Image (tube, grey):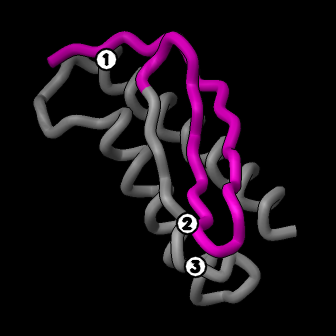
């Protein structure tokens, strides 16, 4: 499956500390939601789990297992790098 991605601009939102849910919201492009429920984002362990969730969400959003032409694969990798950068920047903002 070939996917053309225009770009990713995301915003993470955090709900209350009791039921913290962090979301990546993207308009008019594929999006992913990454939950931080039950994680202490100020601890090394909680942050590591959240970083893994961001990696998995970016992979599911941008990459596929198909053998694609080089131009498609390059766009997928750019999507993946952009999603990671956005997710980690938002995680940094949330965890201080």
**Residue 27 point in image, percent of width and height:** 57, 17
**Magenta region includes residue 23:** yes
**Residue 74 point in image, percent of width and height:** 40, 25
- Label 1 or label 3, whichever comes before in sequence order: 3
Q: Secondary structure at mark 2?
A: loop
Q: CA distance from mark 1 to mark 3?
A: 35 Å
* Apparent side of residue 30 relative to residue 84 in the rendered image (left or right): left
**Residue shown at 42%/23% (left/top)?**
30
Which of the two marks, 1 or 3, is nearer to us in this view?
3
How packed mark 2 is, by other alpha carbons closer than 10 Å (few <14, some 14-19, many 20 or more), is many
Front residue of this view, candidates 89 and 25: 25
As drawn, 8 above or below 38:
above
As drawn, 46 above or below 95:
below
* Label ID, residue 36: 2
Q: CA distance from mark 3 to mark 2?
A: 6 Å
Circle 1 residue = 72
- What's the magenta region? 1-30
Q: Quadrant of the N terminus?
A: top left
**Magenta region includes residue 19:** yes
Asked whether the beta carbons under mark 3 and mark 2 sit within 8 Å of each other, the answer is yes
Circle 3 residue = 39
**Residue 7 point in image, percent of width and height:** 56, 18
Front residue of this view, candidates 88 and 38: 38
Q: Secondary structure at mark 1?
A: helix
- Label 1 or label 2, whichever comes before in sequence order: 2
Asked whether the beta carbons under mark 1 and mark 3 sit within 8 Å of each other, the answer is no
């Amino acid at each position: 499956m070939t996917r053309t991605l225009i770009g990713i601009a995301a915003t993470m939102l955090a709900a209350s500390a009791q039921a913290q849910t962090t979301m990546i919201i993207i308009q008019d492009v594929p999006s992913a939601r990454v939950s931080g429920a039950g994680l202490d984002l100020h601890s090394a362990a909680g942050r590591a789990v959240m970083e893994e969730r961001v990696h998995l969400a970016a992979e599911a959003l941008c990459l596929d297992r198909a053998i694609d032409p080089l131009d498609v694969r390059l766009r997928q990798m750019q999507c993946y790098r952009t999603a990671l950068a956005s997710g980690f920047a938002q995680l940094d903002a949330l965890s201080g």
